[in-house]
Image (spheres, grey):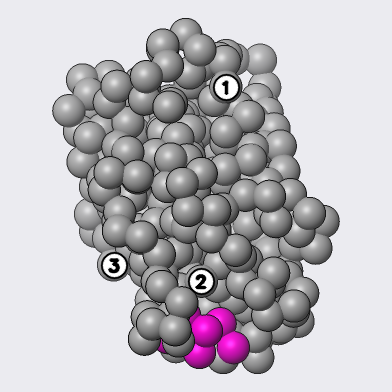
Amino acid sequence: MMRNMGVTLLRKIVIVLACIAITAGCAKFEKQGKTSVVPDNNSGYLTSDTVPNSEVLLPPPPATESTALALDQDISHNSLTLRDSPRWTLAAEDADLTFPNAAGTFSCALNAPITEQDTPHIYMLLHRTLVDAGLSVSEAKKKYMRSRAFVVNKERTCTPNDEQSLMKNGSYPSGHSTVGWAWALILSEISPEQADAILARGRSFGQSRVICNVHWQSDVIEGRFMGAAVVARLHADPVFRADMESAKSELAAVRAKGMKPARDCKAEADALAQYPQLAPWPANK
């Protein structure tokens, strides 16, 4: 069991788990420029003894012929109507947890750039907590090995190159949803004035997994729970708390300079508007 492994071994397998348990394709944590606050060993903040254990915290996935499973299937079926739409394209972009791409996911909601050059402490927080979130879901994924939505309904996904790997990795809970919700909680604390926009984006980030046809709704819901569990535990870590304070100061400096996101925030908002949850932030001009 992972929780019984030593910290040294945990750090050696962190990248493999982040690649398999979350992305089903190796996430290349690339550095930009000559200097970096991101640790070279790609470690998270938590250890094998402190990371929340999804096997302990989560109930089993919906049982065969249960009402909960029927709801999962209905939501999945309805989400397939978004295939090849802008929202489908955004779901494919949300699936990419490689850095530096993933770091900018919340830049429109935050109304600020998130890059290693402009906001290195925020970039580092997202980088390290990605690892913590990924480790937190691994035990339940291994225990239940739930079949993914596309395996059951035989419909294509928004990331066809990942399908072979995803078939070998349990669907429950959603690692992406865990990561997205953890990031949303962290960023909404860093920038409380943007909390509604950030949390809404975190919710839509998880929902992208249903739209992409790689997860069930219950996978996403329990992924959000695990994201909250990870952030709750992170707040007991003094290094994490210190990094949060640095990130707050960093964001204030970025705002003072009037720096804006590099992403097309209008296109993102338009894509999110195709789903029942509307994008709550105005497009940046």
Spatial distance from mark 1 to mark 2, Cα to Cα?
Answer: 27 Å
Residue 100 seen from this side = no
In the figure, 282 relative to 193: above or below?
below
Nearest the eye: 258 or 114:
114
Query: Which residue is under mark 2?
Result: 216
Q: Residue at x 33, y 50 (%)?
A: 226
For this orientation, the residue located farthest to the right is: 161
| Amino acid, disc 2 | Trp
Asked if residue 74 lies in the magenta stretch, the reply is yes
The first of marks 1 and 2 along the sequence is 1
Q: x, y percentage for residue 201?
A: 43, 65
| Image depth: mark 3 or mark 2 in front | 2
Q: Secondary structure at mark 1?
A: helix
| Image depth: mark 3 or mark 1 in front | 1
Q: Left or right: 201 with respect to 84?
A: left
What mark, if any, has residue 13 been given in the picture? Answer: 1
The first of marks 3 and 1 along the sequence is 1
In the figure, 233 relative to 237: above or below?
below
Q: Residue at x 56, y 91 (%)?
A: 78
| Amino acid, disc 3 | Asp
Query: Which residue is under mark 3?
Result: 196
Asked if residue 18 lies in the magenta stretch, the reply is no
